[in-house]
Image (cartoon, grey):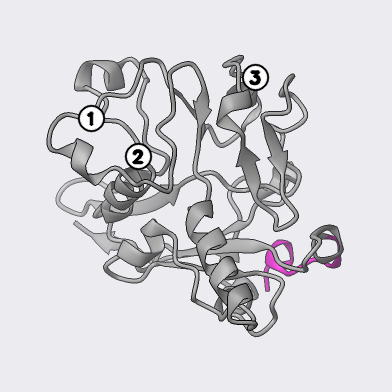
Amino acid sequence: MAKDANVSVENKSRNGNGRRWAMVIDLDRCTGCQACVVACNAENNIPVVTEAEAAKGRWMNWIHIERYWEGEYPNVKARFMPVLCQQCSEAPCEPVCPVYATYHTVEGLNAQVYNRCIGTRFCGSACPYKVRTYNWFDPVFPEPLTEQLNPHVTVRSRGIMEKCTFCVQRIRQVEELAKAEQRPVADGEVQPACAQTCPPGAIIFGDMNDPESRVSQLTRSSRSFRLLQELGTDPAVIYLKGGETNV
């Protein structure tokens, strides 16, 4: 059993309402289709970046698929790993921000206040996972993409850092509905865009501090591990080791 993926008492006491939102990604199921990337872009109003800008490293995706090749032709094997903001409990990006634009919420999320960010990019330099992106230009949405902008997510102006938020707008919507109905949030009720869209169901989302949740149970799997776990950042994204996929 992977000790690093267990629910920690420290995290549970740190969060005001006892929740810690977490994501489990089963690498044995991931096919590298990038449906999660498309869904994330549509849900969070991420602007289109040209090929020329992407070649300069100015990509804007909040989640990207790392592809690893093994072997030589014709016995080539590929492995895929979706990488996004790891929502670290001990996030290196938080203490370096001079204007407190990034902070830790009581539910374990590494939040980003866009209208407070001044674009120093210190957080991007401090992030060991390199999952934060800098908005170099004013967002452009070619027609008819302007018709599909999500009204629940702000369209960010240029000069700020962006990253995955675990679709916090969806989390808040479910929490407010559950509060109005005077009931707890059900396991699996909160679905980020990437988890909802994943065809093979490789992405699972839920409360890590709930021992009965599917996420909590999967974190105790012998296949579980965390990206760069030796750094001690305590990410809320847990991966399940996968097998090899023939190409």
**Magenta residue span:** 1-10
Residue 172, magenta (yes or no): no
The residue that mark 1 highlights is: 141
Residue under the point 29% across and 46% down: 42
Residue under the point 64% across and 81% down: 184
Residue under the point 72% across and 34% down: 92
Nearer-the-camera pick, 5 or 47: 47
Q: Amino acid at mark 2?
A: Asn
Residue under the point 20% across and 54% down: 75
The residue that mark 2 highlights is: 45
Q: Amino acid at mark 3?
A: Phe
What SS does tag 2 mark?
Answer: loop
> Which-is-in-front pick, marks 3 and 1?
1
Q: Amino acid at mark 1?
A: Phe
- Give residue 123's quadrant in the image: top right
The residue that mark 3 highlights is: 122
Q: Where is 191 relative to 74, above or below?
A: below
Q: Position of residue 209 (x, y in %)?
A: 72, 72
